[in-house]
Amino acid sequence: EVHHRVKNNLQLVISMMNMQLRKLQSADVKEAIARLQERVMGLAAVHQQLYQATDLTAVRCDELLTEIAKNIIETTEASAGVRVDFDMTPILLGPDQAIPLSLFATECVMNAVKHSGDTGGKVEMSLTEVEDGKIRLSVANTVSSSVVKESLNTGIGSQLIEAFSKQLNGEVETDWSDTRHRISLTFSPSGFQ
């Protein structure tokens, strides 16, 4: 019941942001609020999953992260024409890990959509078990020719990615080429395997 109430309250916050967005004139301010709104939607999705779960101590992260990515694609103007492919292993985590993981994924998918290029861009998300029972989340995207590599490592999104990875005691790796960007987070689960 608590998770349902939290989700409803977060959706109320999102609605208030929508009201504010309609009144704003500045494109930069609108974009900042829209990105904040997407972050709150990611958090609301975690609480929705917890509310629907029969076991309140575990979250199906493959379903949660897929839902979050689809919501971002459906609600982001920059995502027009962007295709998303998923390779998700069913993985259970407790809320203490599912929340920072979902917020990490939200930031990565928002950045991937933003920088994936013109129509025909592609985003790939995978969640897998790797060596020593660790979990790896990877988000890759095609790169627009107009994206400058250094521009992906600035701003609040990069700071949040770093903060969420630290909450998970995870390691972040980033790979670049002229046409593709990939960010991966590898971390140890805490007792839900």
Image (cartoon, grey):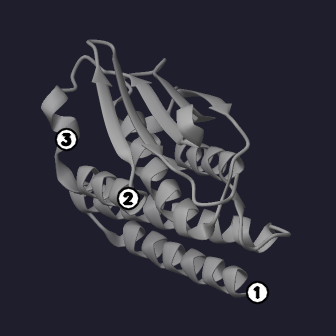
CB-based contact (under 8 Å), mark 3 and mark 1:
no
Quarter of the image where one finds residue 62: top right
> Which SS class for mark 2?
helix
Which of discs 2 and 1 lies nearer the camera? The answer is 2
Above or below for 1 versus 99: below
What's the residue at 19%, 52% (across, down)? 155
Name the mark on residue 1.
1
Three-letter amino acid code at the position of disc 3:
Asn
Foreground pick, 31 / 69: 69
What's the residue at 51%, 39% (across, down)? 137
Quadrant of the frame with the N terminus? bottom right
Three-letter amino acid code at the position of disc 2:
Phe
CA gap between label 2 and label 1 equals 26 Å
- Residue on which disc 2 sits: 164
Which of discs 2 and 3 lies nearer the camera? The answer is 2
What's the residue at 13%, 33% (across, down)? 150
Name the mark on residue 153.
3
> Which SS class for mark 1?
loop
What's the residue at 42%, 25% (across, down)? 141
Furthest toward the top, the residue is: 178
Give the crowd class for mark 3: few <14, some 14-19, many >=20 residues within 10 Å. few
Where is residue 110 shown, x and y percent of the image? 41, 45
Foreground pick, 139 / 10: 139
Q: Counting residues from the N terminus, which is met first, the one under dot 2 or under dot 1? A: 1
Give the crowd class for mark 1: few <14, some 14-19, many >=20 residues within 10 Å. few
Give the crowd class for mark 2: few <14, some 14-19, many >=20 residues within 10 Å. many
Q: Counting residues from the N terminus, which is met first, the one under dot 2 or under dot 3? A: 3
Q: Is residue 152 left or right of residue 185?
A: left
Foreground pick, 119 / 6: 6
Q: Is residue 2 left or right of residue 23?
A: right
Foreground pick, 187 / 125: 187
Where is residue 115 shown, x and y percent of the image? 33, 31
